[in-house]
Image (cartoon, grey):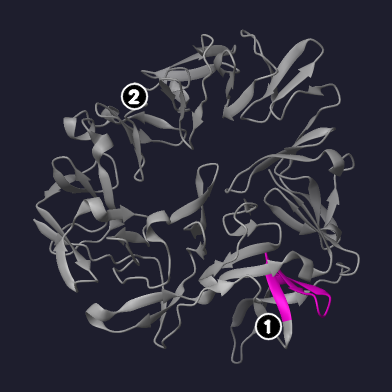
């Protein structure tokens, strides 16, 4: 069966019929003009430096003529924020004004350190008094205080070795994944070189450790070991662990923190492994699929050679997409050493071999047989073919982006909603673009607000999936594009604590 790649995604795009320029916006341009005042949108706040006013995004509603009720949202000036004396805090992935919160009494800003922030919203930090999970304050709402799902650990009896290792008396403790200080028993670690890798995995100059023990299940029977264990020895060699989002490599061993295999390395050759965008980790002999906590053997479901042999040579062409001409909807397309295959995304996968795949080449204005060596899948929205970027529906993007170097900005292995080619910052979720031409001559340009230059990438840090910051500006992504907020233009104190 031959198919043509005609990508019809559920990601919604508003198309404007008017022609637009492909200019790149620079960071000294303003973001929003309202009643001749420049205002800035940030994390639910509308900030107006001219009026010295901060407004909150609140729900509103009312009765409709003839009956019924309507609901909506609008910005309402906040009465408790004093613009001349306020402070905007950016602590990890949390953003708030000082009047809206009550910090925990012992919070010490001079010793505050952000340990880890997660794009899902969680974060860890510490000062000299406490370890904090998820919050460092309570929030004031209608003159009442409520807790921000915060957990704390009192450090008054502990000496801090590093963010994850603490000492009480002669005993050492580690900050466990479930946010407890657990005593290290069963192994001796070198406190000068011990480093946290991920979850409860640590490494020092002597080897790799799983602190706190492990548990696993097999044949409906649970097993456990409650003491720390040394998984690998360095034998005097200097070994630099490689830590990815869902697995790590230590020397010639691959580990993934799936619950029942935490103490056993995956039988993969680290020199041959490849991680595919569809949640597969494989070498030339075995393939593992991604679960809730890591990778587990796919042969638990299907032990055929198709799912194990040479999966590291697969190339992802399209994920969860629609192909016409009788091919089942919403399938994944991959190129293997034995040709092209499509399959559904659920387990066990239903596989169908494809004869040839054709793709539209804008430069020749014709469909041609796909040359996979010149194709790169970026996301459900973007893909690159012969050094040209194509949008979700196969329409080429005309903005001056370096296609070869285009990639997502990540934080601890997780994608943000931003992309870059090393020079431009692109907000990948913005839903408006301009269209020129018709039929095979149709092109699309991302709007000026979606793609900007002048960002200081050397100091750029991730706050959330949609908010980045460098030494001069805060970048707030939303449906309209990137809002550029010059920190000095806010004219109030801004205190920033990041990893």
Q: Residue at x 49, y 30 (%)?
A: 242
User: Looking at the figure, which quarter contains the C terminus?
Assistant: top right
Of label 2 and label 1, which has the lower sequence position? 1
Q: Position of residue 176 (x, y in %)?
A: 64, 26
Horizontal side of 404 relative to 114 (left or right) equals left
Chief SS of the magenta region: strand
Count of marks overlaid on the render:
2
Q: Secondary structure at mark 2?
A: loop
Horizontal side of 229 relative to 265 (left or right) equals right
Examine the structure image and report whether residue 56 is included in the region drawn in magenta. yes
Q: Quadrant of residue 188?
A: top right
Tell me where the magenta segment starts and ends, as one range.
38-58
Q: Residues within 10 Å of mark 1 (few under 14, many from 20)?
A: few
Regarding residue 107, the answer to whether it shows in the image is no
Q: Position of residue 100 (x, y in %)?
A: 82, 59
User: In the drawing, what numbered circle is on residue 268?
Assistant: 2
Horizontal side of 216 relative to 326 (left or right) equals right
Q: Quadrant of residue 199?
A: top right
């Amino acid at each position: 069966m031959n198919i043509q790649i005609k990508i019809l995604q559920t990601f919604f795009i508003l198309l404007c019929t008017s022609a637009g320029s492909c200019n790149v916006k620079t960071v000294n341009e303003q973001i929003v003009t309202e009643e001749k005042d420049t205002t800035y949108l940030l994390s639910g706040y509308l900030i107006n430096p001219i009026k010295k006013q901060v407004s909150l995004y609140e729900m509103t509603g009312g009765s409709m003529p003839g009956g019924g009720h309507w609901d909506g949202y609008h910005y309402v000036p906040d009465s408790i924020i004093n613009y001349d004396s306020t402070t905007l805090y950016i602590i990890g992935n949390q953003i708030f004004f000082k009047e809206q919160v009550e910090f925990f009494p012992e919070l010490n800003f001079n010793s505050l350190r952000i340990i880890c922030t997660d794009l899902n919203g969680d974060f860890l930090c510490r000062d000299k008094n406490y370890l904090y999970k998820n919050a460092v304050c309570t929030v004031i709402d209608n003159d009442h205080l409520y807790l921000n799902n915060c957990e704390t650990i009192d450090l008054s009896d502990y000496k801090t070795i590093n963010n994850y290792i603490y000492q009480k008396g002669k005993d050492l403790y580690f900050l466990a994944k479930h946010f407890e200080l657990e005593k290290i028993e069963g192994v001796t670690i070198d406190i000068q070189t011990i480093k946290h890798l991920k979850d409860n995995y640590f490494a020092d100059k002597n080897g790799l450790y799983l602190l706190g023990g492990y548990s696993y299940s097999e044949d409906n029977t649970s097993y456990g070991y409650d003491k720390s264990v040394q998984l690998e020895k360095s034998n005097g060699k200097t070994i630099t662990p490689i830590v990815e989002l869902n697995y790590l490599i230590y020397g010639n061993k691959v580990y993934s923190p799936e619950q029942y295999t935490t103490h056993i390395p995956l039988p993969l050759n680290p020199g041959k492994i490849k991680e595919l965008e569809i949640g597969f980790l494989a070498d030339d002999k075995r393939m593992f699929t991604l679960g809730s906590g890591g990778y587990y053997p796919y042969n638990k479901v299907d032990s055929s050679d198709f799912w194990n042999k040479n999966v590291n040579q697969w190339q992802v062409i399209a994920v969860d997409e629609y192909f016409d001409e009788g091919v089942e909807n919403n399938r994944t397309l991959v190129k293997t050493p034995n040709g092209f295959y499509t399959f559904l995304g659920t387990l066990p996968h239903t596989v169908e071999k494809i004869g040839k795949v054709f793709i539209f080449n804008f430069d020749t204005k014709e469909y041609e047989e796909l040359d996979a060596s010149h194709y790169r899948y970026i996301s459900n929205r973007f893909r690159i073919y012969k050094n040209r970027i194509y949008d979700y529906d196969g329409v080429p993007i005309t903005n001056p982006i370096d296609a070869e170097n285009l990639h997502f900005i990540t934080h601890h292995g997780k994608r943000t909603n931003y992309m870059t080619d090393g020079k431009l910052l692109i907000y990948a979720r913005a839903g408006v673009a301009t269209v020129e031409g018709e039929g095979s001559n149709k092109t699309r340009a991302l709007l000026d607000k979606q793609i900007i230059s002048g960002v200081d990438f050397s100091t750029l840090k991730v706050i959330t999936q949609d908010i980045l910051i460098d030494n001069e500006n805060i970048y707030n992504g939303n449906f309209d594009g990137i809002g550029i907020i010059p920190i000095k233009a806010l004219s109030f104190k801004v205190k920033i604590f990041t990893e």
